[in-house]
Amino acid sequence: MTKSQLILGIIISLSIFYTIIENAHVSTYIYMIIIASNLIFSICRKNINAYHICILLLTINTLGYLLFGLGAIEPLLMEGNKVANGLIFYGLQLALNILMFFAFIFRVQISRLFSNSKEIYLNDFDGLFHWVFLYFSLISALALIEFILRLVFNLNFLKILYDNYENLVYVGWSVTTGLLFTMQLVFNKMKKQHSHR
């Protein structure tokens, strides 16, 4: 089994695993533990680029979990106003995903604001993580549009994204996890090549 097959297997297995759990809180904890493990590994291996990517991922996912998983968004919601609540709920998710899309586009510049390290550079994975957040943004935007169509035009049958939203998020999480594992493998391979010179 090649490393690319292993990574693909990890992505598919995690997608299935997150879906089988059927508990968003447990899935979120597992996902956060995987990111935190990659963060610790990045610190131990002195991979500042992976470290900053993990920090970005942990920050957005912690914020998302506080808002949506633990209900910190509830004071913003208006009692009895489904349209406004849906706009707030899906709109905030869309805003966070767009923010992260741009955070990953400008990850190197953001990293340089917080660190003077000469090791900060644009790596191949910087060009991939923003696509994951573009995917998340697309899901959020389509869910928002579906929600509006369902309520405004009374299209109650239109629940494709509503019924599958968590599973679609799990696919993105699995790709993110696969990218983190691949990033660690590539960095270790590069470090070994440099040490043999």
Image (cartoon, grey):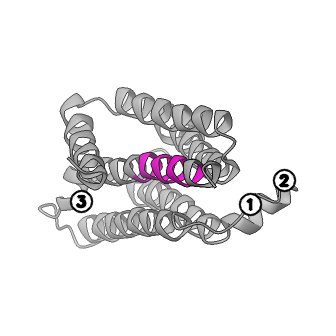
Q: Given this view, does label 3 or label 1 mark the residue nearer the observer?
A: 1
- Give the number of the disc on residue 115: 2
Relative to residue 171, is residue 25 depicted above or below? above
> In the figure, 85 relative to 125: above or below?
above
User: SS at mark 2?
Assistant: loop
The mark nearer the N terminus, 3 or 1, is 1
Residue 180 picture location, percent across and down? 47, 48
Q: Nearer the viewer, mark 2 or mark 3?
A: 2
Residue 161: numbered disc = 3
On the image, the x and y values in percent for residue 191 come to: 60, 50
- Tell me which numbered mark, 1 or 2, is placed earlier along the sequence: 2
- Helix, strand, or loop for circle 3? helix
Residue at 53% from the left image edge and 46% from the top image edge: 188
The residue range painted magenta reads 179-191
Check residue 150 in the rendering and tell me which mark sits there, or answer none.
none
The three-letter amino acid code for the residue at tag 1 is Ile
Q: Quadrant of the C terminus?
A: bottom right
Q: Which residue type carries mark 2?
A: Ser
Which residue reaches farthest right? 116
Question: Residue 150, image x and y in percent?
Answer: 24, 65
* Residue 137 point in image, percent of width and height: 44, 66
Dot 1, how many residues are within 10 Å of its Cα: few (below 14), some (14-19), or many (20+)? some
Mark 2 packing: few (<14 Cα in 10 Å), some, or many (20+)? few
Residue 46's image quarter?
top right
Q: Disc 2 to disc 3, how far (Cα)?
A: 40 Å
Question: Real-space Cα distance between discs 3 and 1?
Answer: 38 Å
**Any mark on residue 120, and which?**
1
Q: Amino acid at mark 3?
A: Leu
Residues at circles 1 and 2 in contact by the CB criterion of under 8 Å:
yes
| 153 magenta-colored | no
Cα–Cα gap, marks 1 and 2: 8 Å
